[in-house]
Amino acid sequence: MKVWIDLSNSPHVVFFEAIAAALEQAGHEVVLTARDHAQTVELARRVWPEIEIVGGASPPGKLGKVKGIAARAEALRRIARRIRPDVALSHGSYAQVVGARAARVWTVTMMDYEHQPANHLSFRAANRVIVPACFPADALAKQGARPAKVSRYDGFKEEVYLAGYEPAPGALAELALDERKIVVVFRPPPDGALYHRHVNERFAALVEQARARDDVHALLLPRSAEQRAHFGALSGVHVPERSPDGRALLARADLVIGGGGTMNREAALLGTPAYTAFTGVLAAVDAELIRQGKLFDLRDPATDPAFVRRELHPGSPVPAARRDVILEAIHTSLTPLDH
């Protein structure tokens, strides 16, 4: 089959790099498009230099975002008619779901955050919906995902690319980390996203706390040009010029403090102390990691991050079997039910 993958956000690059490799190994042809949003294009071009770029960052406001999705959906519909894929696959690319269905392409979408308002669009339009086992059934029902179109997998989507991961030698050389200090990685909240509309005062306070300490090397990975300008102007905060190897950095960090979701889960699954300062409604996948004791909830006033050095361990604690479970769920969803 010809499988068309659309990358609509930065975390999708490393996720679909592993999936695309598995699909190609199974004999499928893979074509890709990407949205120019956050660090998506920068990261994608390191893997696929010729990737086709369609659309950019969402404008502010609900109406602006709806118009942005509609415009990108139409552009993707035209691409679908040109490349004629057998199946469209994404992780929450609402524009691809709409554009692919308009072009009469079998459409598969994945999602692991039940409080994303746009799920109401993509779950109804997609032919198949793939979610983690802990995704609430009532959310699927309310958002239009009929049981017949839903496929579930055990675990977390991040395990696809963390399984067996080992950082390449020198992967973090350009960051010039001060190995004598406590390495703290910060990831700001997704400002402007439909699901995150709150000012995150706790996150800002923790950045201030870290940069005031002489024994901390605070490294912050911004999501936007505005965040880069704001945090880059602060003394005691290192904002890299280019997006580093995220997995290598999280594996090396002594602790991670994130206002979002994916990077927190990556750190937690790699065995790095991870703290969530997310102020939106917590995802079921994050609640499950908190239950397992792998992620710590900074929304609890009694929880404070421990700024201490940790013993580093080579290799990833995520077994290959975890990756294979998710890849199988994807592969079985690619073929229309009547084939």
Image (spheres, rainbow, N blue to C red):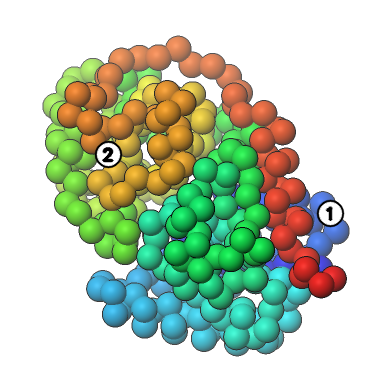
Q: Position of residue 165 (x, y in %)?
A: 62, 32
Observer-nearest of 10 and 261? 261
The amino acid at mark 1 is Ala
The amino acid at mark 2 is Ala
Observer-nearest of 50 and 328? 328
Above/below status of 107 relative to 164: below
Q: Do the residues bearing badges 1 and 2 touch, measured as CB atoms within 8 Å? A: no
Q: In this orientation, does residue 226 appear?
A: no
| Residue at (42% x, 39% y) in the render | 286
Q: Residue under circle 2?
A: 277
Q: Position of residue 290 (x, y in %)?
A: 40, 30
Please state which of the two labelled residues, at mark 1 or mark 2, is closer to the viewer.
2
Q: Position of residue 251 (x, y in %)?
A: 49, 28
User: Mark 2 or mark 1, which is nearer the start of the sequence?
Assistant: 1
Mark 1 crowd level (few <14, some 14–19, many ≥20, 10 Å Cα): few
Cα distance in 3D space between marks 1 and 2:
40 Å
Above/below status of 68 relative to 175: below
Quarter holding residue 115: bottom left
| Residue at (36% x, 78% y) in the render | 66
| Residue at (27% x, 62% y) in the render | 192
Observer-nearest of 164 and 63? 63
Q: Residue under circle 1?
A: 26
Q: From the viewer's perspective, is 326 left or right of 39?
A: right
Q: Quadrant of the C terminus?
A: bottom right
Q: From the viewer's perspective, is 26 left or right of 247?
A: right
Q: Position of residue 51 (x, y in %)?
A: 60, 67
Of all residues shown, which one is farthest toward the top? Answer: 311
| Residue at (69% x, 79% y) in the render | 105
Observer-nearest of 301 and 216? 301
Q: In this orientation, does residue 24 appear?
A: yes
- Secondary structure, mark 2, is loop
